[in-house]
Amino acid sequence: MAGVRLKGIRKSFGDVEVVKGVDLEVQDGELLIVVGASGCGKSTLLRLLAGLEQPSAGEIFIGDRLVNDLPPKDRDIAMVFQSYALYPHMTVRENMGFGLTVRGVAKSEVDRAVNNAAELLGLTPLLDRLPKAMSGGQRQRVAMGRASVRKPKVFLFDEPLSNLDAALRSQMRVELKKLHKALGVTMFYVTHDQVEAMTLADRICLLNRGVVQQVGRPDELFEWPMNRYTAAFLGSPGMNFAEGRLTDGLFESAGLRLPVAASHLVPGASSVANVVAGVRPHAVSVGAGDGTISGQVELLEPMGWETHLHLRVGANSWTLRLSAEEARGLAAGQQATFSVPAEAVRLFDAETGAALCRRPE
Amino acid sequence: MSHDASVTVPWSKQLGRQAILMFATILTLYPVLWVLKIAFSEQSGFGSSLVPWPEHPTLANFGRVMGAVDSAGEPVFFRQVWNSTVVSLATTAVGIAVSTTAAYAFSRFDFPGRNTGMRVFLITQMFPGVVMAVPLYILLDELHLLDSMLGLTIVYSTTSVPFCVWMLKGYFDTIPRELEEAAHVDGASQWTIFTRIVLPLARPAIVVTALFGFMTAWNEFILAATFLSDERATTLPVALQRYVDAFATDWGGFAAGAVLVSLPVMLLFFLLQKHLVGGLTAGGVKG
């Protein structure tokens, strides 16, 4: 087993630079998920690590070995593709054993490794089938099985669940987590799905336009985003934002009066003329409190267990998440006031987007 | 429009359709039947009857064709069958070996001259074979390869390769790259990927290409007639032509020969039919 280290990785295709100087370290045995919108460079990063692309600059280490010049086969990695990429003319057994067979491993040895991996993933009854005779979920599992047979140092996953339907996806998420526990191996996982990232990852790396926004535990990124992009990317419905003025720790803007916990503010940021306040939809409750949000109710979306309320606050439309109980007395068109605790307010520099709030020490 | 079986077509429309189809079928098959009739008939000229089957069936024409002798009195028919077979198989083998590898390179690798190369291949296909006959004759003469199967094989292979490359490249382009990347990561070399992933998946295209290569060589007449003068070195199309000369035409022998020549090609088609199916890559990627 081994960790992975990326140092100053850049990659350009023609004139377009898609990865712009990424430094990233994956601990031995860790499941790190690179998440980002499509086109952010995350798949390119994965392909660089796999050796399917060459970096324009920078160094890639797997374990202590510099692998920049090594072909994929010598990097001791396995990859699960978004499209599964199973060899269509080979049975499941041949697919899973291919990596060992081409490396000249004895047939009995290959059979044993394939059988073990198949058992772990519940693939034993499918071993003699062709990929076309299997469902999407089964193919996905075979792809994972093929990757695990060789016992590589690092697993690479390229959006492995995005071709599955919602129910199967959450089931495979659980299986993937189990697989990670069972193998205890380093996994580098790429997805655009924040739910996958939040639920699976030991740590998340959020990428935007080829630049790392933040790396950390999922709760860390969610609670203490280091910039506005991270704050907006994670969470569904997303964080609400409004521009305004911060005076002595009090944020004000049309319809908003939000005191900010003093211990959260970075030094020297108690008064700023132009800031953006962010409030998570779930942090509010009906009625007045220390921080107030007031505006006109635009729309209610009842889900049964909770209700999403769209509120016109100044020039912005905010989404608030209320319990079904709390939302009962509210109707579209009416004026309403909600409260936010000072600890739930996040501030960002209006120009750079950098966070002005941090975890108190 | 739905092609569901439950959709009823008005009888008048149906009648019209069937009539057209029948007419087209008769038009296509009549000459073939006519050749068969002459091959199995006694008289060596055209009969005046329009009936497309022989009145007194006989195998005499076939016996005469198979028993044909050269000027020295040696039997030559089976010798010519052998020539045609060897040249056609060799052309196919060389053509497939060269065009699969070339087409794969054109499909997957980035190298200078890639697009130009493909275009040049296309341009060579624009000239009729006769144009090439004289320069090729001079070349083969210089190389002492006239009247030789090797010479003919080289000529046939080189003329069929460009078309084969185009056809195969088109097919290779449709094979998902992820499959090869997966194999790369799995540890396969470029050659292993080519032979164990790409070629098996391209089987339908390769079969079609092989069939094309074989038929080109098997049926080719002009170049063979130009390069081969020794009766013992000729291929079947050239031998056939000898039944039609300036003074007398042995239509019976010609027709019987034509039937014999087309048998192997028909046989090949039947044998290879099951490989001519697409959809081999189904199930490899996506759901």
Image (tube, rainbow, N blue to C red):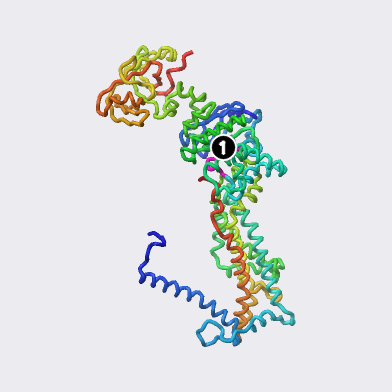
The image shows residue B24, relative to residue A224, as above or below, that is below
Provide residue A313's location: percent of width, then percent of height: 30, 24
Q: Where A203 falls versus B210 (above or below)?
A: above
Report the predominant secondary structure element of the magenta stretch. Answer: loop
Query: Closest to the observer: A4 or A222?
Result: A222
The mark tally for this picture is 1
Left or right: B201 as drawn, with respect to A317: right
Which of the two residues, B202 or A100, is positioned nearer the viewer here? A100
Q: Amino acid at mark 1?
A: Arg
Q: Is residue A63 magenta?
A: no
Q: Would you say B144 lies left or right of A180 here?
A: right
Q: Quadrant of the N terminus of chain A?
A: top right
Residue A125: image quadrant is top right
Q: Residues within 10 Å of mark 1 (few under 14, many from 20)?
A: some
| Residue drawn where x is 52% and y is 39% of the image | A13
Which residue is identified by label 1? A47
Disc 1 secondary structure class:
helix
User: In the visual, does B136 lie left or right of A10?
Assistant: right
Q: Name the residue rendered at 41%, 12% in the picture.
A: A262
Residue B146 position in % (x across, y down):
69, 70
User: What range is drawn magenta here?
Assistant: A78-85
Closer to us: A199 or A34 = A199
Residue B264 in the image: state x and y as whole percent: 63, 70
The image quadrant that residue B10 belongs to is: bottom left
Question: Label 1 is found on which chain of the structure?
Answer: A
Residue A74 locus on image (x, y percent): 66, 37
Can the viewer see residue A12? no
Residue B215 appearing in the image: yes
Does A128 sit above or below residue B160? above
